[in-house]
Amino acid sequence: MVRMQRQLPQPSELFQLLKFRRPSLRVGQTRLRNAQSIEDLRDLARWRTPAAAFDYTDGAADEEISMARSRQAFQDIEFHPSILRDVSRVDTSCEVFGGPSALPFGIAPTGFTRLMQTEGERAAPGSPSAYRRWAPPPSRTSAPRIRRAATSSSSM
């Protein structure tokens, strides 16, 4: 049996493998940067969001059966990565309701959006348009307030 002598790596070899970061005093940004899954992001939201708003956003109706099925369907997705494919030019655009969309993704009116963002449904239509995405009109309950806000801001 051949016996191998143990070798310790040289410091110069170790520094190539270790990537040191400067310490940050911004705890929230550090936690967000280190989040590796949807569950990690959910835990961050639970920590930062008031309990009533988090429970409303995180929960579902009745026994939460449809939410459990949706989560299970998401967990059942299995990715099969294809390596060595050219991804320098990826086009996700498509046509939605006769108009262009950079991503096949939409934002639907949900109600109580001011629990999570101070501008609420007034901000929702502007976000997708910035990314050429489709957004439906706001819900009936907030539409008059949005029209009033739009006319008051355009008259300034």
Image: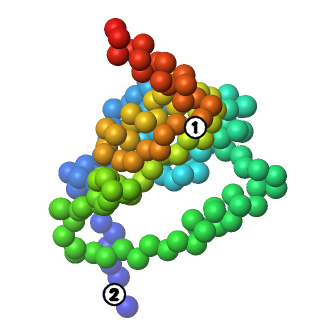
Q: Which percent across, then down, holds residue 155? A: 35, 11
Q: Secondary structure at mark 1?
A: loop
Inspect this view and state whether residue 85 appears: yes
Quadrant including the C terminus: top left
Of badges 2 and 1, nearer the viewer stands: 1
Q: Quadrant of residue 17?
A: bottom left
Q: Which percent across, then down, holds residue 54? A: 67, 36
The outermost residue toward the bottom is: 1
Quick one: label 1, few (<14), some, or many (20+) residues within 10 Å? Answer: few
Q: Secondary structure at mark 2?
A: loop
Q: Amino acid at mark 2?
A: Val
Q: Is residue 150 left or right of residue 74?
A: left
- The residue where tag 2 is placed is 2
Which of disc 1 and disc 2 is earlier in sequence?
A: 2
- The residue where tag 1 is placed is 139
Q: Quadrant of residue 63?
A: bottom right
Q: Residue at x 71, y 61 (%)?
A: 66
For the residue pair 12 and 78, the one nearer the viewer reads as: 78
For the residue pair 27 and 44, the one nearer the viewer reads as: 44
Q: Which percent across, then down, holds residue 71? A: 63, 61
- The reply to whether callout 2 and callout 1 are in contact (CB within 8 Å) is no
Distance Cα–Cα, label 2 vs label 1: 76 Å
- Count the numbered circles shown: 2
Quick one: label 2, few (<14), some, or many (20+) residues within 10 Å? Answer: few
Quadrant including the N terminus: bottom left
Say the numbered circle drawn on residue 27: none
Q: Residue at x 60, y 35 (%)?
A: 140
In the image, is residue 74 above or below residue 60? Answer: below
Q: Amino acid at mark 1?
A: Ser
